[in-house]
Image (spheres, helix red, strand yellow):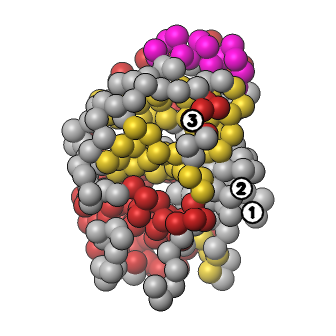
Amino acid sequence: MSAVDGRRRAWMRNAEAICELFEEATLRMRACRWRKHSCVVLPSTGRLLLTGDLHDNLPHFEAVCDLARLERSADNHVVLHELIHGDRLVNGLDMSFQMLGRVAELVIAFPDQVHPVLANHELSQYRGHGVSKGGGDQTMKFSAGLEWVFGDDADSVADALDGFIAAMSIAVRTEQGLLFSHSLPGEAYLNEFDFGVLERDLVDADYEGPAGAAFLMTWGRGHSPTSLARLAAEWRVQLFVIGHMYVADGAEAPFRNLVTLASDHAQGRVLPIDLSASVTTATQAIEQAVPIASFLRVEGA
């Protein structure tokens, strides 16, 4: 069970409390001992749990918290991303700010172990860009949810939430040569992409399309052996792991050095990584992927 389970979450309806929550988590995330500019660089000891898109799937998030085993060792880490804009609407409103709040709690409880990574839906909410998963503009539904819950204080909550999103890293990498990001720039934009983005702090232009570095690290499509080879050479990476794609089986290996993960549907999977072990091929990696359905909490158990 997560260390933050069972708390009374006053912040779910209290603007001052939720602003304080996001502000504290923002400070903790930026002060993470493994943070280096826009990237988290993990040591070669311990265990890393990689997730795919979650999209406000609370039961799967709870299973991820259990599988991460954060309480058992300070050397256990988890990556979380694509947290908001799910299918669970309340009177047509998106209430997935609550998922971001749960992640903020987890960051505060385990600041050097929990690593939220920027994804395209968080970026879109932060920058006010429209985005849809097939059910209308979800950024508008999210903002309407904040207004319904917090009323005149919704703008203050949105500002604190924006600060939390802006503090997210865009990649997590290991000393053994694995790099996780929500997506990667596709071949069409490689010549415009700033390969040095992992070694500097982000600026406003990075978040804007079509060629901002953070934009391409969250929205990128059109990956190919050529684009992956160039990225691998520039960053000295042996294996990339990303989300952002539709992955029917939860984990796929479209190329020998690329794994795609999804954690938000019935076949969703997560990928545990031994940080001390040599990086394998993508095909070998997905053999280690774990189905989330096997670890869902049972009500009343």
Secondary structure at numbered mark 3: helix
Residue highlighted by disc 1:
136
Q: Circle 1: is it few (<14), some (14-19), or many (20+) Cα within 10 Å?
A: few
Residue 188 lies, with reference to residue 85, above or below; the image says above
Q: Quadrant of residue 6?
A: bottom left
At a point 61% along the width and 14% down the height, the residue shown is 229
Task: Report the span colored magenta.
Answer: 223-236
Position of 104 compared to 181: left or right?
A: left
Disc 2 element? loop
Q: Earlier in the sequence, mark 3 or mark 2?
A: 2
Q: Is residue 26 above or below residue 92?
A: above
- Cα gap from disc 1 to disc 2, whole angstroms: 6 Å
Q: Amino acid at mark 3?
A: Ala
- Seen in the picture, residue 63 relative to 247 is either above or below; the reply is below
Residue 48 place in picture, x, y as percent: 40, 43
Q: Amino acid at mark 2?
A: Ser
Magenta stretch holds residue 176: no
Q: Main secondary structure of the magenta part?
A: helix
Quarter occupied by the N terminus: bottom left
Which residue is label 2 attached to?
132
Kind of residue indicated by mark 1: Gly
Reading the image, the residue beneath label 3 is 285
Q: Which residue is at the front of the view, 178 or 212?
A: 178
Q: Are marks 1 and 2 in contact (CB under 8 Å)?
A: yes
Residue 285 x %, y %: 57, 35
For marks 1 and 3, the one nearer the N-term is 1
The crowding category of the residue bearing disc 3, from other C-alpha atoms within 10 Å (few below 14, some 14 to 19, many at least 20), is many
Q: Give the residue at x 55% y 43%.
A: 288
Residue 251 in sight in this render: yes
